[in-house]
Structures are given as C-alpha cells and as structure tokens.
Amino acid sequence: MALVAARGTLLRAGVRLGTEAAACGRNGTRRSASHRVLVEPDAAAGIATIKFKNPPVNSLTLEFLTELIICLEKLENDKTFRGVILTSNSPGIFSAGLDLREMCGKNPAHYAEYWRAVQELWLKLYVSNMILVAAINGASPAGGCLMSLSCDYRVLADNPRYKVGLNETLLGIVAPFWFRDTLVNTIGHRASERALQLGLLFPPAEALQVGMVDQVVPEDQVHSTALSVITQWLAIPDHARQLTKSMMRKATTDNLIKQREADIQNFVSFISRDSIQKSLQMYIEKLKQKKS
Ligand SMILES: CC/C=C\CCC/C=C/C(=O)SCCNC(=O)CCNC(=O)[C@H](O)C(C)(C)COP(=O)(O)OP(=O)(O)OC[C@H]1O[C@@H](n2cnc3c(N)ncnc32)[C@H](O)[C@@H]1OP(=O)(O)O
C-alpha cells in the first residue's frame, strides 16, 4: 500500500517511473536517477552507490523520499546488488533531515502522506536484505542521522563541521519512538537518553566515541572506506547475515508496523498544534537569519 501511495506521489510530481527504473538498472555505467537520486551501479562487484542530490541541503522532501523508497525497492528486488553505499552528491551536507517546509503550514492530509513516506523509508532501510553502508560526507542532523543509523555501518568524514545526531528537541519537537529505538539499538540506552534530551549533534571524534559512527576517516577516503567495508561484509554468506540482521532488527520494525496508523495520527495531531507550528517557523527563521 505504501509503495502504491509513493508511486501516486511521484506521478503527481511528474516523475517518470520509466526513467527511474532505468536509473536503478544493472549496467556498470553511471546513470542518473529521475531527479534527486543518483545511482552508480557496479554490477560486477554487486554494489551500488546511491548519491543524494536534492539541493541545497538534501532535506527529505516528499518527492525525494519517494524517489529514495522506489530506488531502494528496485535495488532490493534486483539480485545483482548485495550492497549499497548511501552518500551525498554534495560533500558538506549528507542530509539536513526532514524537510521543515513539509511540516509547516500544510494540511493534515499532507502531514499524513508525508509521515507515511518517512516511515516507509525507515522500514526499507532498517530491514533491508542488502548490506547498507553510510558514507557520511557532510552534516547529518535528525532525519539525515536516522538514515545513517538505519544502515549496517557508518563511515564519517573527519571534519568538525560534519556533526551527526538527533537534534529534534532543539526544534521544539520530539523524536518518535522508532527514531529513539534505532538510536538505542546503536549506542545504548543511557547515551541515547542524554543525546535525545539535549538534542546533541556530535562532531566526528565524539560521534565515534559514543558509537554514532563506526569509523572516522579523512574526507577523501570516505567512499573507498565504505567500499572496503562492504567488500568485507560481502564475504559472509548472505542467508546467514540476512537472518541475523532480521533477528536483531525485526522486533524494532514490528513495533512500528503494528501501530503505524496510530503513529501517523499522533504525528499529524502533534505537528498541527499551533505551538509546534510556531516553533518550526521560528527555527526556519533562525536558519535564514544565520545567513544575514
Ligand atoms: C510526534 C513526532 C513529531 C515530530 C517528529 C519530527 C522528526 C523530525 C526530524 C527532522 O529531521 S527535523 C529537521 C532537522 N534538521 C535540522 O535541524 C537541520 C537544519 N539545517 C541546518 O542546520 C543547516 O541548514 C545545515 C544542514 C547544517 C546546512 O548548513 P548550511 O550553512 O550549509 O546551509 P543553510 O543553513 O544556509 O541552509 C540552506 C538552505 O536550506 C534550508 N534548510 C536547511 N535545513 C532545512 C531543512 N531541514 N528543511 C528545509 N529547508 C532547510 C535553509 O533554510 C536555507 O534556505 P534559504 O536558502 O531559503 O534560506
């Protein structure tokens, strides 16, 4: 159902599915996806690199989310690819997380459609049968960080500006339970409690220390490191690794699946509150003022 809804969104957005299907094809040559998702397939190695290309900051707009979901689904169904690297086409910004404009000044039906797509992307990433490695080549707050936490391994470029974390409380909003669970599964309960309450954004050395990332490497080695990690993981028999991943993660995704509609309703009523709308607008203003 979610994919049907996603396709509906894409078609309304004027995206041609044929182009997208080609983008996630198995040729060894670089192809560009419909708009916002570039896929570099290496069929011989069984690895594809997905590059986010949604300027200026790779924020997760509904259209970008939808393209990512469809692309991941196509790769998942194409047995050529056993490993995927997620990275940004614009070094400096991995992803600014959820698009604030999707959560501001819109109607409840839009918020519901948007939140379903956010849930769907997380579900696709978190229990993917493929080996997912995040090559984090830029700042990665909130939803951007969630994407990387949903991968199997995280490599972060060593640049003090590239902070990662779930900073929702700084915006006056609350990370939902499945964001929390993903963090807890990665860095443990106590560290998560502190990080979530304070909305901490960790620079590389701290991110490594707390376990938000698995490796910090010089900026120009992020992709090659991700590649060599995937190559090591590819040596493990797929069925054994996949069943183990599922055993570790399924309870967390089942928890959302069983209360998916309630979670959407909760998001819609929370985000529609006047006080929350004001907080988000103030945050957007602050981002604008930072420039001037
Ligand atoms: C019940 C549950 C309820 C709610 C749960 C909701 C969970 C939410 C999860 C989220 O992901 S919320 C989003 C959190 N994201 C952020 O806090 C990031 C904010 N952005 C930044 O900190 C910076 O922009 C940056 C990513 C570090 C990049 O900095 P830089 O200096 O390079 O760019 P600049 O700040 O000038 O931004 C350029 C341009 O982009 C706009 N922008 C930035 N982030 C977003 C965003 N998340 N959504 C939409 N737009 C964004 C920014 O306003 C600038 O726009 P302008 O050019 O028009 O001024």
Image: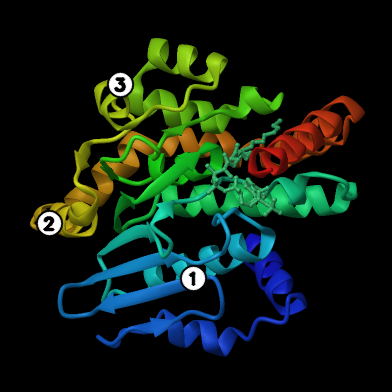
Q: Amino acid at mark 1?
A: Val
Q: CA distance from mark 3 to mark 1?
A: 30 Å
Q: Amino acid at mark 2?
A: Ser
Placement of 233 over or under 186, stated as above or below:
below
User: Cβ(mark 1) to ligand 1 < 8 Å?
Assistant: no
Placement of 90 over or under 104, stated as above or below:
below
In terms of depth relative to the viewer, which is nearer, 94 or 68?
Answer: 94
Q: Residues within 10 Å of mark 2 (few under 14, many from 20)?
A: few
Placement of 117 over or under 186, stated as above or below:
below
In terms of depth relative to the viewer, which is nearer, 2 or 153?
Answer: 153
Residue 265, percent from left and from top: 80, 37
Count the marks.
Answer: 3
Q: Quadrant of residue 11?
A: bottom right
Q: Secondary structure at mark 2?
A: helix
Q: CA distance from mark 1 to mark 2?
A: 23 Å
Residue ID for mark 2:
228
Question: Is there any visible trace of residue 135 in the rendered image?
Answer: yes
Q: Secondary structure at mark 3?
A: helix
Residue ID for mark 3:
210
